Structures are given as C-alpha cells and as structure tokens.
Image (cartoon, rainbow, N blue to C red):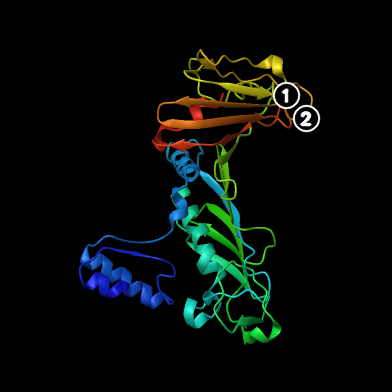
C-alpha cells in the first residue's frame, strides 16, 4: 500500500512495521527519495515535551560529549502463554517482534536525543513461550481475557519475547538496552538515560512529565576551580525572578518563602555538610512559553550530588531551555 501511494505521488506516513524485511524497506526508502515526497514511520514517542527538552539540552551543549546511553522498554501484555496478537506470528509481523515493535522506539529516541546513530550492535534474543495458546476466535488486544480451554489452539512461536542489546554509537559512545513484553507490572515503560561529560538526563515514559537531571559537583578545597555542592550549577548571572503565582512546600520550611501576589525568587538551598535525609523543595510557577513547571532539588549526599527533577512541563518553545532556572 505504501509503495502504491508513493507511485501515485502521495505523501506517506507508515505505521510499524514499515516492511517485514530489510530488502523491502530499502526499496521503499529508495522510491521515496526518488519521488521527493514526504515520508516517515510513526516513531511518535520522541515528541513528548520532556524528550524534546533532553534533545534541546544536548544541542545547547549542556550535556557535553555523550559517553553512555542506556535504558529499557518493558511491557507485560504478552506475559502469559494465553496472550495473543497478530505480531507473534513472523509470517504476519516479520522475523522480529519485541525488538522490532518496541525496541525500535527506544533506538529512535536514543538517536533523536543524542544526535548520534547506532553504528554496530550485538543482541541476544530469547523466546520464553515456545508455544502459545491462540484463541480460536478474535479477542481484543490488551484485554487479558481468560477463555475456556477448548477455546484455544496451541501454536509454535518463532518471534522473541525479550531482547538484550549492547551497541556503539560511533567511535566513543557506548550503550545497552533491553526490550521485553513479559515484564509483569510494566505496562509501557520506555526508560532512557543519557550520560554526558557535563551532566546527564533520564526519562521514564510511565512518568512522562518528569525529567531527571544529574550533575557531579565536588567539594574539593584543593581544587578551587570546582565549586562546592551548595554553589549553583547555573551559569553566573543575576538571580532569577519569576513573575506570577508561586507555591512552595519543603521539609525545611524556614528555608523558603513565597507570596502569591508578588514575583518569586528561587534560590539554591545550602545543604548540611553531613549526609542526611533528602531536603527537597517543590516549586510551581508560570512564565511565558512555559506552563505549570515544577522543580525539585534533592541532596541525598549533600556535598556530592546536585540533581534536579522537572515535573509537569508543557512547553511551546523547547529550545528556550530550562537550565538557567536550575539554581
């Protein structure tokens, strides 16, 4: 159908799998290039606001050079041998199932965020259910309905339930990920971590409005170039004043103050010099181009960790970046 549409001069958006073989996919790609028509495959998960924020941070140089990319894509909808879907049969869905169906989303997001391409890999694919009980009549996907024993027929399975992959992205960057459709309790967990030479980011699709940002800030008196943990990771600048409504809750209420009718200035707390339970501050405020942004600062080991979690972000201008607000 996609080939016929391209030959008819139509732009094409094609759902996965694009084809069931690399040869057929190459034919479509070459046809699309020759036609000059717009074409794409539906890797829509890259358009979550927090994923776009990770990409913007990498493009602005905030992550530094990318060292490690890792994560997982875990689901449980094919955990039981009575779970069935047309993708299980390689004749219908192609020779790969889990890696092609959801692993491809993870790979696309990793490349989209880092700007790098997976250049080589080594994968271990495994099928836990060598046979499955296929319903004799149509059932709804994800329904989890149990039928009577006589309503099933046993069929062999030749596509994988699980995949583990180690890979390279060029000469320097290394990574690893797993893809699973038999992970009990994980409904749709795409988890991606990107570690750079300056800072790191991590995102979980099951908590899509949160973005973890990690930094390593040492307190080393014999290295005056390295700031103490309580000093801001924000570039030197005038303290930020955010107009609008502000709400603050904290485990140390004396540290923070806010008024709902005047601008709120977010400051970096000074952590204790000894290890102690996490002290956190959660702020919600509004600013042009951003809606309902919350920031959490946590110091689990006060002198050695300065990380942040952004939550509730809806962004109409991702390129604006959030890092100047992380004080």
Callout in the foreground (2, 1): 1
Q: Which residue is mark 2?
A: 277
Q: Which residue is mark 1?
A: 251
Residue 19 % position (x, y): 40, 74
Picture quadrant where residue 290 is located: top left
Picture quadrant where residue 188 is located: bottom right
Q: Residue at x 65, y 82 (%)?
A: 133
Image quarter in which the C terminus is found:
top right
Residue extending furthest front? 148
Q: Is residue 280 visible?
A: yes
Q: Is residue 223 visible?
A: no
In the depicted structure, whether residue 322 falls above or below residue 190: above
Q: Residue at x 54, y 78 (%)?
A: 138
Categorize mark 1 by other alpha carbons within 10 Å: few (<14), some (14-19), many (20+): few
Q: Residue at x 55, y 74 (%)?
A: 85
Categorize mark 2 by other alpha carbons within 10 Å: few (<14), some (14-19), many (20+): few
Instruction: Looking at the image, tell me whether mark 2 or mark 1 is earlier in sequence order.
Output: 1
Image quarter in which the N terminus is found:
bottom left
């Amino acid at each position: 159908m996609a080939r016929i549409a391209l030959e008819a001069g139509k732009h094409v958006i094609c759902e996965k799998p694009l084809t069931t073989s690399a040869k057929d996919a190459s034919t479509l790609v070459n046809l699309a290039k020759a036609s000059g028509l717009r074409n794409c495959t539906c890797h829509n998960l890259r358009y979550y606001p927090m994923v776009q924020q990770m990409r913007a941070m990498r493009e602005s140089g905030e992550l530094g050079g990318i060292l490690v990319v890792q994560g997982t894509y875990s689901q449980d909808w094919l955990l039981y041998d009575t779970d069935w879907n047309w993708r299980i049969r390689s004749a219908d869905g192609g020779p790969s199932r889990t890696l092609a169906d959801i692993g491809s989303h993870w790979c696309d997001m990793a490349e989209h965020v880092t700007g790098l391409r997976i250049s080589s890999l080594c994968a271990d694919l495994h099928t836990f259910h060598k046979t499955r009980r296929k319903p004799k009549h149509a059932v709804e996907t994800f329904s989890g309905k149990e039928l009577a024993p006589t309503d099933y027929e046993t069929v062999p399975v030749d596509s994988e339930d699980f995949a583990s992959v180690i890979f390279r992205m060029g000469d320097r960057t290394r990574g690893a990920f797993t893809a699973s459709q038999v992970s009990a309790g994980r409904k749709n967990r795409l988890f991606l971590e990107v570690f750079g030479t300056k800072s790191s980011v991590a995102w979980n699709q099951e908590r899509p409005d949160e973005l973890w940002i990690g930094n390593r800030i040492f307190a080393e008196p014999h290295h005056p170039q390295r700031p103490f943990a309580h000093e801001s990771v924000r570039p030197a600048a005038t303290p930020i004043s955010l107009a609008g409504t502000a709400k603050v809750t904290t485990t140390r209420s004396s540290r923070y103050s806010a008024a709902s009718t005047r601008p709120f200035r977010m400051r970096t707390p000074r952590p204790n010099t000894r290890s102690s339970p996490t002290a956190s501050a959660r702020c919600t405020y509004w600013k042009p181009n951003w809606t309902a942004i919350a920031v959490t600062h946590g110091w689990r080991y006060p002198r050695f960790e300065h990380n942040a979690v952004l939550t509730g972000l809806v962004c109409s201008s991702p390129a604006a970046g959030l890092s100047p607000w992380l004080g």
